[in-house]
Structures are given as structure tokens and as C-alpha cells.
Amino acid sequence: MLDAFLKDNGQFSNYGVEHTIAFTLCIAAIWLMLYLAKYKWNDDQKYRYMVYISVFAASTQLFKVFYRVYNGTFNPTEDFPLHLCNLMVILLPFTMIFKWRKLWGITFFWIMIGCAQSIFTPTLTESMPHYEAVRYWVIHSAIILGALYGIYAFGWTITWKDTIRSILGMNILAAILFPINLVLHSNYMYLNAKPPGTTFYDLLGPWPGYIIWLEVLVNGLFTLVLIPFYWNDIKRYLARVVA
């Protein structure tokens, strides 16, 4: 049993049965937590349960690092939690424990645009019950939940200032990680090469051109994400223009 949890199997494939089941469970779990937070839990429960979830998710990410250091298989080019989704799950407990609204606003865009697509096109090689597969689905479910939780449980909203801070923060993070990738010969945040497998990056062309297209796409998508939060203002403006 332990071998099945720890020994690499390389059997996961995108859009197969396991992917479909994991994706469905991921969406169902997120929906259930949001439903409970909005309609069933009191304020104390909303806070405590999300803190528990965020700490557990971050722990699954850190387990990967400590386990691989312990058994001598740690690879600095792959195993530091420096990919965007891995960073988000490390930050998630801080966001939830301190109800850090500004950090939530910045990471909301990173998660909903940069990380949420990972459950549709996973960069995953190991199949269940391998811990890497467990980690992958746990952290992605948790960070997507965390992004939506601020809206449905805490009543937070997104503003244009969050968009600007998020875009600036993303570029600062990329500027920090790019030289780290050069030194380590790594590919954190997929800045130096496209991720393995079939992902949406394949639509953006070869490196380094896809970085430019990604920047354009991300800026556009970040702006589009604002529309639901400003929809009433937009409708009022259009009504005045038409009138």
C-alpha cells in the first residue's frame, strides 16, 4: 500500500477516466464548501473550516518537499514550491488565517486565470493513489475554493485596483523567477519552456513568443474578470448612453 502511495507509476493521462472522476470530485467539493459556507455555517465555522482546509492543503505541498529531501530524491529544478499554483497554496493559510483581503485580491486573478485551468489540462504524470496525484488535486481544489470563498463566505469583492496590483505582482514574480530558472536550469512558472503534456500553452506558439502572448492574454483575461463585479455600474452607464 505504501509503495502505491510513494512509488512513481507515470500512468496518468489527460481526459481519461481518472481525470474525469478527479475533475468532477474537485468541482463537487468546491461547490459543497461554498454552499455550506454561504447557507449553513456561522461566521466562526466559515473561518475555522477554511483555515483547516488551507493548512491541510499547504501541508500536502510541503510534504512533497520534505519527503523528497528525506529520501534523497529532491530535485531543485522541480521540487521547490515555486510554480504558481504551489505558491498560491503556500500563501493560502496566510490569506485565510489573517483574512488578508489585499493578498486575496491579488491572488484571485492568478488563481482563477492561471491556476484554475490546471484542472482542465493537468500537468500531472502520476496516477492515484500516488501522493503526487493526491497533492495535485488537493492543492488545486483548495486554491480555487479559497479564491471563491472570499466572495461567497466573507463577502469580499474585486476592484480595478486589485487588477493592477495583480498584474504588477505577476510580472515582479516572473522577473524574480526567471533568473532563478537560469541558475537552477529549472522551469518554474513555465517561464523558460512550455509545460509537459497537452496544455493550453500549446496554442500560444514556441518559446519565447508564448511568453508575450501569455502576457497579452493574461492582461485581457484579468480585465474580463472584473466585468461581473462592475456589471451594475456597466448597465447604468449603458442606460445613460442609450437614453
Image: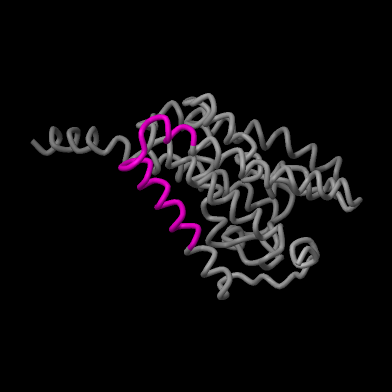
Q: Is 172 rendered above or below residue 214?
A: above
Above or below: residue 20 compared with residue 41 = below
Q: Quadrant of the C terminus?
A: top left
Between 83 and 12, the residue placed more toward the observer is: 12
Residue 104 or 145: which is nearer the viewer? 145
Q: Nearer the viewer, residue 17 or 119?
A: 17
- Residue 150: give x, y in percent of width and height: 42, 35
Within the magenta stretch, is there residue 103? Answer: no
Q: Main secondary structure of the magenta part?
A: helix
What residue span does the magenta drawing correspond to? Answer: 25-48
Query: Is 129 located above or below residue 117 in the figure?
Result: below
Residue 194, quarter of picture:
bottom right
On the image, the x and y values in percent for residue 213 come to 57, 50
Q: Is residue 33 above or below residue 134?
A: above
Residue at left 73%, top 42%? 62
Q: Position of residue 58 (x, y in %)?
A: 64, 41
* Residue 172 as seen in the image, left or right of residue 27: right
Rendered-image quadrant of the N terminus: bottom right
Magenta region includes residue 29: yes
Residue occupying image coordinates x 67% and y 42%: 59
Does residue 5 appear to the left or right of 106 in the view shown? right
Q: Residue furthest right?
A: 72
Q: Residue at x 80, y 38 (%)?
A: 180
Residue 18 at x, y = what percent? 58, 71
Give the farthest residue toward the bottom: 17
Q: Is residue 99 left or right of residue 127?
A: left
